[in-house]
Amino acid sequence: MATAPPVFIGTYDHAVDDKGRLAIPAKFRDGLGQRFYATKGLDRCLFLFPESEWQKQQAQLASLPLTMRDARAYSRLFFAGACECELDKQGRINIPSHLREYAGLAKDTVVIGVMSRVEVWSREAWSEYSGKAEESYEEIAEKLVSGGGTVE
């Protein structure tokens, strides 16, 4: 019997230490597994993918034609910025400096669950993004539903 893929939900405040380490919320550790992947996300956050979801992302991007300029650009940035992560004994990962710089991670961070992935945001960027998105939450839901989505 196949196991269901992990579903990540919730919001957690954490901090990046002086050595670039971030504690992964305990609720996310099992779903991510001992080894997982981090890369540049959208909206200046980081995406953390468990192995199974990483493979899905890889297959999806590999299926795009090399002749599409946007597909090449996105794939390059997605994979060039990626790294393999392993939890240490305290449940932390070391985030490489290029990813910390990309997401503006200095100290205070917000770690959120978004279905099949975990996102890491600077607290300031998350506050700004979520504040704007919350203002139009109902409008966004209406667009998704009227566009054929299933959000209710």
Image (cartoon, grey):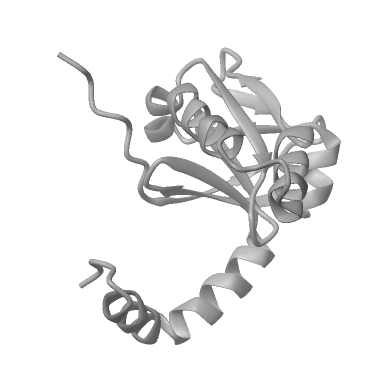
What x and y, as percent, mark residue 84?
Answer: 66, 21
**Total number of numbered discs in the rendering:** 0
| On screen, residue 30 above or below 95 | above
**Left or right side of 102 for 146:** left
The answer to which quarter of the image holds residue 62 is top right
What x and y, as percent, mark residue 87?
Answer: 58, 18
What x and y, as percent, mark residue 137?
Answer: 39, 80
Residue furthest left as drawn: 1
> Which of the two residues, 70 or 24, is positioned nearer the viewer here?
70
Quarter of the image containing the C terminus? bottom left
Could you tell me if residue 105 is visible in this image?
no
Q: Residue at x 45, y 26 (%)?
A: 32
Q: Residue at x 32, y 39 (%)?
A: 7
> Which of the two residues, 21 or 69, is positioned nearer the viewer here?
69
**Left or right side of 6 for 68:** right
| On screen, residue 11 above or below 130 | above
Quarter of the image containing the N terminus? top left
> Which of the two residues, 140 or 100, is positioned nearer the viewer here?
140
| On screen, residue 58 above or below 118 | above
Q: Residue at x 54, y 22 (%)?
A: 91
> Which of the two residues, 23 or 7, is positioned nearer the viewer here?
7
**Left or right side of 22 for 56:** left
Q: Residue at x 52, y 30 (%)?
A: 59
What x and y, as percent, mark residue 78?
Answer: 70, 41
Could you tell me if residue 68 is visible in this image?
yes
